[in-house]
């Protein structure tokens, strides 16, 4: 493009603030706009005084038309397709032109101060943030999370929902079909309708593992991303209460976004990546924001006295579903430590998420803080792959300019590809953007009603859209421990041959034997152990799945027994079975070191009646 056909932007070449932002705009607009210090070309524009050139930026179009101030900036950026909305808003949105010119004038009069703020918050770099390397790292970590999830689930799926499992999938599908008819296929979106057998459940876990490996090594990445999402969706629906956790929904929501972030080439090579579409990067940030901010809001809106009184963490380490050894030590920290920690958690979850959309350096600070929070949670509890998945989303707070300082030079070189290879246009169809817009609307509206207007019923159309998003796990409502459990009750399952002498089953990870140390199990999730924690919060009659669990133990079903650590009836199933409720507390230091006890316990009451195959429940 010749200089005569190019638009020009005239700026103050002596102003550090102006030079920083002009360099940034120049990277956006490329050769379509020529940026010139007015000191060099003022004589060519006699109709503009030097005082005006020093005070305001001027944009001279190819036809010689001159614009100044905020409009000059917007017209320059309008040379880039994705930034034309600025000038459209300036022309058509009432009040936007007036407000933008006033803001521009204020900044222009205080350029020295804003130059300092720019260095503090944005840094000295003038490059437009690019997330190519961040996307490459996110996809690798997401693939690792998928791999963990499928392998973990594959070791227990038949015992949970297999043909002889606790909640057989076949029963679920038959009940749904009987009550919903043809709508059951839509309400329960799982490929396992085709073959709800143990073989199919295991094949889905194996297939998910293989596709996760393909995604990890960037082989058929888009196919692998789509297949892992579809297989995990099918297993999540089939898993009923055992796969109803927030991290399962988070994995599906993040996995759905990942489909749009994967390279288009079938054999991409392990190190290759593509510049991601900015909209999908923004949606990944939005997902992280909703996850963190909702976690703080539900704590405040629940009215729970332990969060209001800043005492929640006095109970958390002891009463969380699966504590570990570190939890025991944190529990015995001084009360003042727990008070400060509780306040810090609320502050981080309510304030730090806003740094997700802040300028570069503030985003970097927010990323470091959120990463430290996740590492602390990982250290003091067992939350399977939740922390790793959250860390993966945090990568989008670091653009490539920041990540390049931390990754090996070879990786930076090999992962770089030209923007011409980007999949943005290919995925930038109207249908894709319409789907994303719908997704954004649902998630935004759901968050609004969750946090700001819980007492009112959302409009019917919003409820229908939100239901669609939840049905396919495209949008989740997040927020752990809205109400803190202050007492730890444990269900101890016992069997007997004569109804008098009882022997206890031992679970693999949940507290039972008071001398067994709480262990690290993450990123694996023992889903039966987790559900036993929830069952202890409810009555026996309101937890139908545990009734099925006890029935399977009476029958000696091997798939279910494989979920346990110790079966005292290996030769013959017991004739009777019962569940007892105990209060568990962490032991004190004296008991821990003199008696080897990690827990204290006392009997509370019977949790279930005595059961046998000859006298089943009604």
Image: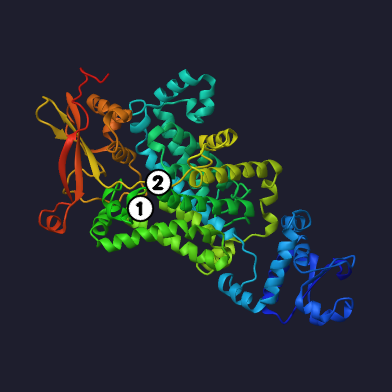
Q: Secondary structure at mark 1?
A: helix
The answer, for residue 220, to whether it is visible in the render is no
Query: Residue 550: x, y in percent?
Result: 25, 28
**Image side of residue 164 versus residue 329, left or right:** right
Q: Quadrant of residue 274?
A: bottom right
What's the mark number on residue 307? 1
Instruction: Please state which of residues 529 and 448 is positioned toward the viewer in this rendering.
Output: 448
Characterize the local packing of mark 2: few (<14), some (14-19) or many (20 or more) Cα atoms within 10 angstroms: some
Decide: is 593 above or below 361.
above
Residue at 43%, 31% (x, y): give it.
238
N-terminal label among 2 and 1: 2
Cα–Cα span, label 2 and label 1? 9 Å
Q: Secondary structure at mark 2?
A: loop
Q: Quadrant of residue 22?
A: bottom right
Decide: is 228 above or below 184.
below
Query: Residue 505: x, y in percent?
Result: 20, 36
The mark tally for this picture is: 2
User: In the rendered image, which quarter contains the N terminus?
Assistant: bottom right
Query: Residue 201: x, y in percent?
Result: 42, 32
**Image side of residue 117 versus residue 66, left or right:** left
Residue at 67%, 72% (x, y): give it.
107
Residue at 58%, 50% (x, y): give it.
283
What's the mark number on residue 302? 2
């Amino acid at each position: 493009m010749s200089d005569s056909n190019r638009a020009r932007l005239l700026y103050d070449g002596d102003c550090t603030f102006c030079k920083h932002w002009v360099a940034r705009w120049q990277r956006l607009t490329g050769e379509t706009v020529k940026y010139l210090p007015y000191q060099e070309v003022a004589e060519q524009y006699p109709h503009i005084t030097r005082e005006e050139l020093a005070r305001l930026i001027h944009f001279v179009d190819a036809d010689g038309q001159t614009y100044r101030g905020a409009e000059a900036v917007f017209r320059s950026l309008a040379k880039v397709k994705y930034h034309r909305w600025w000038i459209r808003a300036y022309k058509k949105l009432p009040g936007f032109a007036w407000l933008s010119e006033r803001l521009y004038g204020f900044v222009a009069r205080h350029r020295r101060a804003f130059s300092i703020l720019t260095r503090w918050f944005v840094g000295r770099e003038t490059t437009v943030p690019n997330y190519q390397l961040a996307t490459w790292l996110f996809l690798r970590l997401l693939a690792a999370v998928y791999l963990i999830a499928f392998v973990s689930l594959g070791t227990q799926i038949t015992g949970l929902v297999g043909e002889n499992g606790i909640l057989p999938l076949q029963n679920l599908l038959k009940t749904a079909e009987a009550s919903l008819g043809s709508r059951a296929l839509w309400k329960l979106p799982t490929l396992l309708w085709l073959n709800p057998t143990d073989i199919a459940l295991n094949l889905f876990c194996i297939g998910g593992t293989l596709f996760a490996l393909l995604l990890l090594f960037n082989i058929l990445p888009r196919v692998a991303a789509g297949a892992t999402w579809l297989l995990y969706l099918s297993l999540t629906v089939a898993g009923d209460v055992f796969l109803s956790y927030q991290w399962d929904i988070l994995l599906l929501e993040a996995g759905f976004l990942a489909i749009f972030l994967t390279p288009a080439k079938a054999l991409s090579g392990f190190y290759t990546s593509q510049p991601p579409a900015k909209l999908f990067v923004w949606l990944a940030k939005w997902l992280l924001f909703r996850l963190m901010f909702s976690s703080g809001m539900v704590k405040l809106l629940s009215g729970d006295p332990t969060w209001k009184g800043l005492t929640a963490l006095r109970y958390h380490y002891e009463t969380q579903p699966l504590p570990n050894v570190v939890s025991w030590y944190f529990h015995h920290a001084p009360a003042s430590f727990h008070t400060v920690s509780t306040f810090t958690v609320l502050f981080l979850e309510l304030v730090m998420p806003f740094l997700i959309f802040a300028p570069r350096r503030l985003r970097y600070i927010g990323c470091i803080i959120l990463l430290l929070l996740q590492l602390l949670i990982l250290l003091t509890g067992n939350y399977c792959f939740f922390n790793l998945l959250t860390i993966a989303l945090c990568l989008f707070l670091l653009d490539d300019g920041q990540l390049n300082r931390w990754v090996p030079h070879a990786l930076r070189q090999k992962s770089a590809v030209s923007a011409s290879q980007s999949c943005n246009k290919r995925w930038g169809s109207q249908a894709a953007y319409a789907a994303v817009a719908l997704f954004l609307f649902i998630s935004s509206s759901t968050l609004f009603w969750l946090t700001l207007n819980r007492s009112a019923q959302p409009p019917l159309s919003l409820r229908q859209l939100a239901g669609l998003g939840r049905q396919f796990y495209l949008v989740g409502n997040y927020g752990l421990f809205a109400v803190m459990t202050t007492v730890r009750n444990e269900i101890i399952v016992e069997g007997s041959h004569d109804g008098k002498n009882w022997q206890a089953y031992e679970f693999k990870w949940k507290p039972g034997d008071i001398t067994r140390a709480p262990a690290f199990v993450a990123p694996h999730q023992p889903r039966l152990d987790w559900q036993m924690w929830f069952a202890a919060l409810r009555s026996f009659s309101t937890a139908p799945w545990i009734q099925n669990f006890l029935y399977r133990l009476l029958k000696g079903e091997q798939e279910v027994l494989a979920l346990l650590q110790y079966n005292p009836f290996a030769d013959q199933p017991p004739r009777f079975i019962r569940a007892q409720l105990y209060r568990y507390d962490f032991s004190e230091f004296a008991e821990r070191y003199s008696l080897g006890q990690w827990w204290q316990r006392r009997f509370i009451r019977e949790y279930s009646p005595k059961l046998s195959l000859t006298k089943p429940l009604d």
